[in-house]
Amino acid sequence: MYKNLSDVNLLCVPLLCMLASYGCGKREKSTPELIADLKSPQEKDRVIAVRLLPGHKGDAAQVVPAMIEALKDKTNDIRWSAAIGLGYFGDGAREAIPALQAALTDRDARVREAAGVALSRIDPAQFTSPSKQPRSSPRP
């Protein structure tokens, strides 16, 4: 069928270039699509959305309120990811401060820690990073 390796290369190289240029048929979801996925009954869809939305900083006016709402999700990983994601917006997520303060009492320790870190990124003058807070007692 193929006489030598160069014949195979002649077929493979254009095929690889086509796949690379078209992204193997996948496209990136838009901000409104990801925000809609946050309300999906499928946990997988919500996890993917909450982890991709922080990359849409240009749409902060839409993303931040959706991430605040995700802090109320029943799934720990989604609340944790929402808290982390809000921290990426820094000062642009000031409206999330009350929700993040409420998350400081979440039943999941990871969510509490992520909320503290996010608060320190949003308003470093008011909130100290949990890793920089003084310890109440020295370690043994």
Image (cartoon, grey):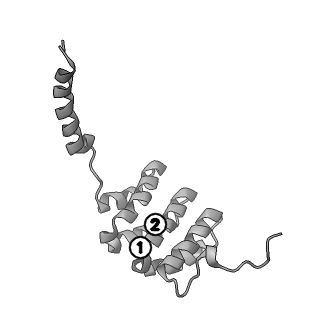
Q: Nearer the viewer, residue 122 or 75?
A: 122
Say which mark, if any, is on residue 85: 2
- Residue at 51 percent across and 68 percent down: it is 83
Q: Amino acid at mark 2?
A: Gly
Give the Cα distance between marks 1 and 2: 7 Å
Residues at discs 1 and 2 in contact (Cβ within 8 Å): yes
Q: Position of residue 70 (x, y in %)?
A: 47, 64
Q: Position of residue 27 (x, y in %)?
A: 26, 49
Element at badge 1?
A: loop
- Residue at 46 percent across and 66 percent down: it is 85
User: Is residue 133 rendered to the left or right of residue 114?
Assistant: right
Residue projecting furthest to the bottom: 125
User: Is residue 128 rendered to the left or right of residue 95?
Assistant: right
- Residue at 55 percent across and 59 percent down: it is 74
- Residue at 18 percent across and 12 percent down: it is 1
Q: Locate the C terminus by quadrant.
A: bottom right
The quarter of the picture where residue 58 lies is bottom left
Element at badge 2?
A: helix
User: Is residue 28 rendered to the left or right of residue 91?
Assistant: left
**Mark 1 — residue?**
89
Crowding at dot 1, Cα within 10 Å, few <14 / some 14-19 / many 20+, comes out as many
Please determine whether, in this image, residue 101 is positioned above or below residue 82. Answer: below
The quarter of the picture where residue 91 lies is bottom left
Q: Position of residue 54 (x, y in %)?
A: 40, 65
* Residue 3 appears in the figure: yes
Counting the numbered discs, the total is: 2
Q: Amino acid at mark 1?
A: Phe
Crowding at dot 2, Cα within 10 Å, few <14 / some 14-19 / many 20+, comes out as many
User: Is residue 105 rendered to the left or right of residue 40?
Assistant: right
